[in-house]
């Protein structure tokens, strides 16, 4: 590999700040995703990236500067840049937020060319029959788990109360019959389809009707056991931490998960303990553990 | 196809970061009963977002603008490919006509 300083266009032995500055400038010019049409960009960017990565490792840079090692880095793993996906069908997931090209009448370019594609006779007839309105509704994790009532405003100003069923899932579509504004063709009023988007929760992960959460516990709580209050989607519960609970130990709290559809009862809430030492190193604790460790060695790695 | 947890580990990002990116629709994984599922396009996008933030030091409000512009750019390119594909199915005399017109334009 060529000299990394040369690749980045800085003086040999330049400090890391200069290296990073030079890399930023080059990356902006060469990053394939920022220059979709540039075929040479990919190889050039990979070379520049390798050089940057090599020099970003302080130890490596120091040794290279001293002449102890050469710049032969390991070859970078094969990488497919975003632009390759974005140029094709997979990229349509990330259409421009205003979806300029979805509605042919909204386009200023290609309007003539593409008018025939969407507005076939059958499609127009379908529009006359019933104009369904699609609406996306974002709700909180807890509202989805427990059910809620939300109000939405349709285009045109009409307000609608929407009952979110308990146990609603992300991507679920609710149908409110006959609530859409009538299509201009005079067909009968269509339905309002509401696509539910559930916001993720910082602590809870949903798996079916069960909720999984990581629960930090202190060292004394783990070693000696404890009774602690723990949040669930169904409210707080008092949990008994068993003596000797370890990181990764899992406990099930029955019936404190998500309401199953159809009101069949709730799923369960699972906690996985994570033992946390105090934030700041404690000399008293260290002294204690040193004495203890001498008399009680135990293995957690390697063959048993 | 990759899970939320695997993404955090593979791309060395924080849970709170990825959650935020999904909420802002910078990343749009598919949703299944088991949770979010990330396709290759989503992973490549996460790699891009990571690089823009970490290496190119693009701040989040600017990044929002950058992603919006990129999305418009790629949508335009996809549209052009559709036109190109249609163009290729035309008879050669018609294509020759179009080429001549384009040359005259520029």
Image (tube, helix red, strand yellow):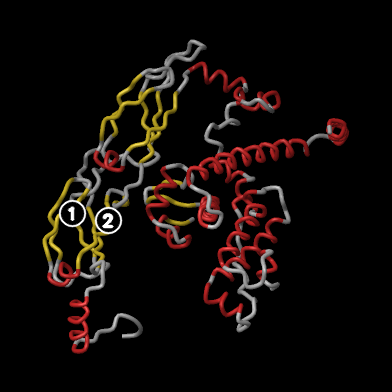
Q: Provide the residue designation for mark 2.
A: A213
A94 left or right of B100 in image? left
Image height of A148 relative to A256, above or below: above
Circle 2 — which element?
Answer: strand
Q: Find out whether the residues at labels 1 and 2 contact each other: C-beta distance under 8 Å.
A: yes
Name the residue at 62% across, 69% down: A14
A231 left or right of A28 in image? left
Q: Nearer the viewer, residue A216 or A2?
A: A2
Circle 1 — which element?
Answer: strand
Name the residue at 17% across, 81% down: A288
Q: Provide the residue designation for mark 1.
A: A230
Q: Residues within 10 Å of mark 2 (few under 14, many from 20)?
A: some
Are labels 1 and 2 on one chain?
yes
Image height of B43 relative to A158, above or below: below
B34 left or right of A148 in image? right
Q: Nearer the viewer, residue A290 or B24?
A: A290
Image height of B81 relative to A134, above or below: below
Q: Position of residue A184 (x, y in %)?
A: 50, 12
Q: Position of residue A296 (x, y in %)?
A: 20, 86
- Disc on the earlier residue, 1 or 2: 2
Q: Nearer the viewer, residue A32 or A87?
A: A32
Q: Residues within 10 Å of mark 1 (few under 14, many from 20)?
A: few
Give the residue furthest to the top: A186
């Amino acid at each position: 590999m060529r000299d990394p300083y040369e690749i980045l266009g800085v003086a040999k032995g330049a400090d890391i700040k200069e290296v990073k500055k030079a890399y930023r400038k080059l990356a902006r010019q060469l990053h394939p995703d920022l220059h979709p049409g540039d075929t040479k960009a990919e190889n050039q960017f990979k070379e520049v990236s390798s050089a940057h990565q090599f020099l970003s490792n302080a130890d490596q840079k120091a040794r290279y500067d001293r002449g102890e090692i050469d710049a032969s880095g390991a070859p970078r793993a094969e990488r497919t840049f975003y632009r390759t996906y974005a140029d094709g069908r997979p990229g349509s997931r990330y259409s421009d937020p205003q979806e300029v090209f979805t509605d042919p009448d909204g386009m200023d370019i290609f309007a003539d060319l593409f008018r025939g594609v969407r507005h076939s006779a059958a499609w127009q007839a379908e529009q006359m029959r019933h104009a369904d309105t699609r609406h996306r509704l974002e709700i909180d994790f807890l509202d989805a788990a427990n059910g809620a009532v939300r109000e939405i405003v349709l285009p045109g100003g009409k307000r609608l109360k929407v009952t979110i069923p308990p146990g609603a899932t992300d991507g679920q579509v609710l149908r409110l019959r006959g609530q859409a504004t009538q299509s201009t063709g005079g067909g009968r009023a269509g339905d309002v389809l509401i696509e539910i988007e559930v916001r993720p929760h910082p602590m809870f992960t949903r798996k079916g009707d069960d909720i999984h959460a990581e629960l930090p516990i202190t060292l004394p709580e783990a070693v000696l056991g404890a009774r602690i209050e723990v949040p669930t989607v169904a409210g707080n519960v008092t949990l008994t931490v068993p003596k000797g609970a370890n990181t990764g130990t899992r406990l099930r709290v029955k019936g404190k998960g998500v309401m199953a559809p159809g009101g069949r009862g709730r799923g369960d809430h699972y906690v996985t303990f994570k033992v946390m030492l105090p934030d700041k190193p404690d000399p008293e604790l260290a002294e204690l553990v040193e004495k203890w460790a001498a008399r009680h060695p135990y293995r957690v790695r390697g063959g048993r | 196809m990759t899970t939320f947890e695997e993404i955090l580990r593979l791309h060395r990002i924080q849970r709170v970061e990825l959650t935020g990116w999904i909420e802002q629709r910078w990343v749009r994984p598919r949703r299944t009963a088991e949770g979010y599922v990330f396709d290759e396009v989503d992973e490549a996008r996460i790699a891009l977002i990571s690089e823009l933030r970490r290496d190119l030091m693009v701040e989040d409000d600017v990044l929002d603008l950058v992603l919006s512009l990129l999305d418009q750019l790629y949508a335009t390119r996809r549209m052009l490919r559709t036109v190109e594909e249609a163009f290729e199915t035309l008879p050669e005399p018609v294509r020759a006509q179009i080429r001549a017109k384009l040359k005259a334009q520029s």
